Amino acid sequence: MTASPNVPNHELVYRAARDLILFGELTPGQAVTIQGVVDRLDAGITPAREAIRRLTAEGALRASNNRRVVVPELTMDQLQELTYARTGIEPQIARLAAVAMEPADIDALEAIDGQVNAALAAGDIRGYLSHNHAFHWTLYAHSEAEILMATAASHWLRVGPSLRVMVMRVDARLLPDMHQVAIAALRDQDYEAVGEAIHQDILQGHAHIAQGLEEAL
């Protein structure tokens, strides 16, 4: 964890702990302790405790009756809720973003997608998830839809650990590349098609998570 003179230490610890969940380095059902966060992130006890508190409030972690904090395991019903929520919000964010994007912005987005593909080719799951996140949030940032983006961010935290499990069991290189579809639509200034590409990208990932949940029953 790299220190920053402009960001308080407790915020850095929170972001680093959030990324462990977001990119699936903490797996569904895994216990999360203050000491574990301290050791893993070389953090102090107070910011580690605060990070766990915040992530629990956001639904990224769950406190059980015995006060044990764990990464939640998605149920099929919860995944269905997340599918409804994400496909209702993120395509609209993408449409709003598309209207504001210049050719240079699209080039930058395509460069990130190149990093997504390179990580996949190298079998770098963590790299794939982080670059995939960067692709979506670089696109979404152009929308300036802060309320919608904050809501979408909470959904990503809930699905991140299960998404990693999905990528580990499915060769994502064989799936339709909806990022490229979105980029082509951006260049054509077809804003509805951009939203539809993001819609299909979400459905694709969630379908494979659902398959994994069914196989685990």
Image: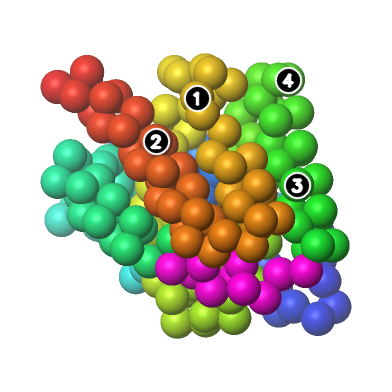
148 shown above or below 24: below
Residue closer to the observer: 106 or 172: 106
Instruction: Please state which amino acid type lies under the numbered disc 2.
Output: Gln
Residue occupied by mark 4 = 122
Q: Looking at the image, is mark 4 or mark 1 earlier in the sequence?
A: 4
Mark pair 3, 2: CA separation: 20 Å
Q: Secondary structure at mark 1?
A: loop
Are dots 1 and 2 in contact, CB under 8 Å?
A: yes
- The kind of secondary structure the magenta stretch mainly shows is helix
Q: Quadrant of the N terminus?
A: bottom right
Crowding around mark 1 (Cα neighbors within 10 Å: few <14, some 14 to 19, many 20+) is few
Instruction: Please state which amino acid type lies under the numbered disc 4.
Output: Ala
Q: Looking at the image, is mark 3 or mark 1 earlier in the sequence?
A: 3
Residue closer to the observer: 39 or 172: 172
Q: Nearer the viewer, mark 4 or mark 2?
A: 2
Residue 175's disc is 1
Q: Looking at the image, is mark 1 or mark 2 earlier in the sequence?
A: 1
